[in-house]
Image (tube, rainbow, N blue to C red):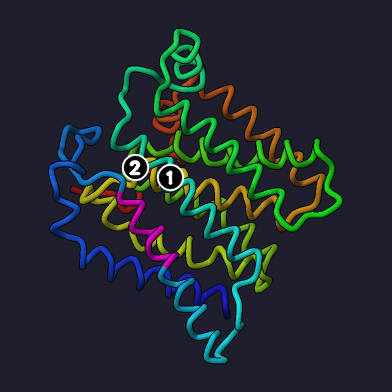
């Protein structure tokens, strides 16, 4: 029940923030054209991050008064750090990035020519943050395992961002990936910690689908990073290794193939992708 409550609270918190931020979201500084050329507020994934911060603050205040846990456990703190850190990196790319360089090849190619793009900042910053996240409170874990787990988190963040090419798609992919994790975690600390994050993004799904806002990297990166971190914290070495291989393969494929084209050509994927979408 704690997981369900966490999702519901996440939805309610982000809807409150959306309602309170209507004027701010339509500031010219935040508007960008979407795939159909419509100017929409971008980087609105930061509202989901803000919702999670508020929820964790509330948990801490109630805990201080003896309601619930007196202190946030390590898992909740790590999830919060992942939200804030990857949210900030994504926000930088949303507001200062350009479309001149694409994918790892594009950004690393730019770096080879002496240009530091926002994508490079995300790669380096996201990798460093992932190392911090997977190293915390895990005494005895080998150096090689830390590196591979950090790579898992960073690639999960990047891959979810690659799916954010159509309204609602990144959130749908995130929720689909969350379901087996939620079944596995049930009501343990990992399941409870990530529930408000998922709820917050579900609360943005309707606006995203109907093209009233765009998550931006500030949202899609967060979804992927939190799910990747949950895999690291919840699953054993074998499962983590399998997930890492899948992420590596999909990342390499993305450099050669457009996921959007694949989705458009596969009927069942196209129908799921279009589900709930409207003008």
Label 2 crowd (10 A; few <14 / some 14-19 / many >=20): many
**Part of the protein shown in magenta:** 44-53
Residue at image position (44%, 65%) is: 52
Task: Using the rendered view, name the quadrant where residue 64 is placed.
Answer: bottom right
Q: Is the magenta stretch mostly helix, strand or loop?
A: helix
Most foreground residue, 266 or 156: 156
Task: Using the rendered view, name the quadrant where residue 54 is placed.
Answer: bottom left
**Label 1, on which residue?**
220
Could you say where residue 26 lies in the image, as x and y percent from the top left? 14, 50
Tell me if residue 55 is in the magenta stretch: no
Numbered badge on residue 254: none
Numbered badge on residue 216: 2
Residue at image position (52%, 60%) is: 80
Could you say where residue 137 lies in the image, as x and y percent from the top left? 74, 58
Most foreground residue, 242 or 54: 54
Tell me if residue 52 is in the magenta stretch: yes
Q: Label 2: state its secondary structure.
A: loop
Could you say where residue 39 lies in the image, as x and y percent from the top left? 15, 39
Could you say where residue 10 lies in the image, as x and y percent from the top left? 42, 69
Residue at image position (46%, 22%) is: 103
Q: In this view, does 67 lie above or below 192?
A: below
């Amino acid at each position: 029940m704690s997981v369900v409550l966490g999702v519901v609270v996440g939805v309610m918190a982000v809807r409150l923030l959306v309602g309170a931020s209507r004027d701010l979201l339509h500031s010219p500084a935040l508007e960008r054209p979407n795939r159909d050329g419509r100017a929409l507020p971008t980087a609105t994934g930061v509202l989901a991050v803000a919702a999670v911060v508020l929820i964790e603050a509330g948990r801490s205040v109630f805990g201080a008064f003896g309601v619930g846990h007196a202190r946030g456990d390590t898992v909740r703190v790590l999830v919060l750090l992942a939200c804030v850190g990857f949210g900030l990196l994504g926000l930088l790319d949303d507001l200062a990035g350009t479309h001149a360089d694409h994918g790892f090849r594009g950004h690393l190619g730019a770096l080879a020519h002496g240009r530091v793009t926002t994508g490079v900042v995300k790669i380096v910053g996201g990798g460093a943050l992932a190392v911090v996240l997977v190293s915390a409170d895990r005494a005895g874990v080998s150096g090689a395992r830390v590196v591979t787990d950090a790579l898992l988190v960073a690639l999960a963040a990047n891959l979810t961002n690659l799916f954010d090419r159509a309204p609602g798609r990144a959130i749908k992919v995130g929720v689909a990936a969350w379901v087996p994790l939620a079944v596995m975690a049930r009501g343990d600390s990992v399941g409870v910690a990530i529930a408000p994050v998922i709820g917050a993004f579900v609360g943005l799904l309707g606006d995203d689908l109907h093209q009233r806002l765009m998550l931006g990297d500030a949202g899609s990166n967060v979804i992927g990073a939190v799910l990747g971190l949950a895999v690291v914290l919840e699953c054993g070495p074998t499962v983590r290794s399998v997930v890492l291989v899948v992420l590596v393969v999909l990342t390499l494929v993305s450099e050669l193939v457009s996921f959007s084209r694949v989705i458009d050509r596969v009927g069942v994927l196209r129908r799921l992708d279009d589900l709930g979408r409207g003008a």
